Image: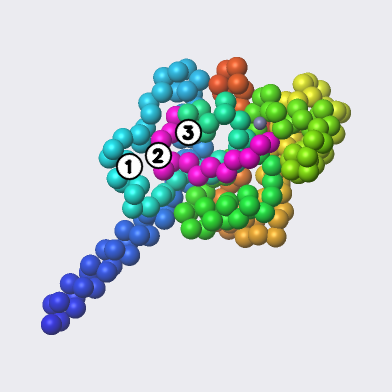
């Protein structure tokens, strides 16, 4: 009887360890390195298509363990799995036109960092973003489009005083604004940034080169 109990305890401890190791995700820096490597592969059109196989399909049937959260635009020209050369179960994506901030975005990020153990959040704006262009053009065709442009508007205003392309600068300001809003929201995200090594990085996708670059927040110094 004692042997059976011991065996059961060993089996239980193995299961617990396995579960714990599954939710221990890679660090933010390691995740960023993976994204950079994948993006380099894509920009050179040397795609490796990792994690796209029947084996992977069956593997992730048991659960997901993505290594990065990508908040990006719905634009069909910016599919995260392709531009970062990733596969099934690798990226937890939150997409809407203009990659704007709202409660659904906060809830989705919270879920992924708390329950899936993801350490890196990338807010990815892109060149020639239609939602940003609609904001610049003062498109008020519906209250729903306006719900997007209202959020982007301050980023456009800020871009008017910056050197360079108005649209690109507004896209970058918008990605920075979303990153800041995530931290400043009354959610647990800030706590995970301060105490659990979660990092939030704004980034910009160049549609000509295919390269993603991190955006430096100059805190209004531009
Ligand atoms: Zn866009």
Q: Pointer 2 and pointer 1: residues touching (CB < 8 Å)?
A: yes
Query: Looking at the picture, does residue 21 appear above or below residue 68?
Result: below
Residue at x 74% of width, y 43% of height: 144
**Dividing the image into 4 quarters, which one contains the N terminus?**
bottom left
As rendered, which of 208 and 27 lies closer to the eye?
A: 208
Residue 182: percent from left, percent from top: 67, 50
Q: Secondary structure at mark 1?
A: helix
Which of the numbered marks, if any, corresponds to residue 220?
A: none
Q: Which residue is mark 3?
A: 81
**Range drawn in magenta:** 85-98
As rendered, which of 218 and 119 lies closer to the eye?
A: 119
Q: Is residue 137 magenta?
A: no
Which of the numbered marks, if any, corresponds to residue 88?
A: 2
Circle 1 Cα neighbour tier, 10 Å, few/some/many (<14 / 14–19 / ≥20): some
Residue at x 75% of width, y 27% of height: 133
Residue at x 45% of width, y 46% of height: 66
Whether residue 204 is visible, yes or no, is: no
Query: Looking at the picture, does residue 20 appear above or below residue 48?
Result: below
Whether residue 52 is visible, yes or no, is: yes
């Amino acid at each position: 009887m004692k042997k059976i109990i011991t065996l059961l305890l060993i089996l239980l401890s193995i299961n617990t360890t396995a579960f714990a190791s599954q939710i221990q995700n890679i660090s933010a820096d390691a995740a960023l390195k993976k994204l950079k490597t994948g993006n380099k592969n894509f920009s050179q059109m040397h795609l490796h298509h990792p994690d796209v196989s029947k084996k992977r399909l069956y593997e992730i049937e048991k659960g997901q363990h993505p290594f990065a959260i990508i908040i990006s635009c719905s634009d069909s020209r910016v599919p995260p799995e392709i531009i970062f050369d990733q596969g099934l179960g690798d990226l937890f994506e939150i997409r809407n036109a203009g990659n704007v901030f709202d409660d659904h975005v906060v809830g989705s990020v919270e879920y992924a960092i708390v329950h899936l153990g993801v350490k890196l959040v990338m807010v990815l704006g892109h060149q020639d973003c239609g939602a940003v262009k609609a904001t610049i053009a003062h498109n008020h065709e519906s209250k729903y489009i306006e719900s997007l442009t209202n959020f982007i508007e301050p980023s456009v205003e800020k871009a008017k005083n910056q050197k360079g392309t108005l649209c690109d600068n507004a896209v970058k300001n918008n990605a920075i604004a979303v990153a800041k809003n995530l931290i400043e929201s009354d959610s647990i995200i800030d706590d995970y940034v301060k105490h659990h090594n979660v990092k939030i990085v704004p980034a910009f996708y160049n549609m000509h080169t295919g390269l993603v670059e991190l955006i430096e927040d100059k805190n209004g110094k531009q």
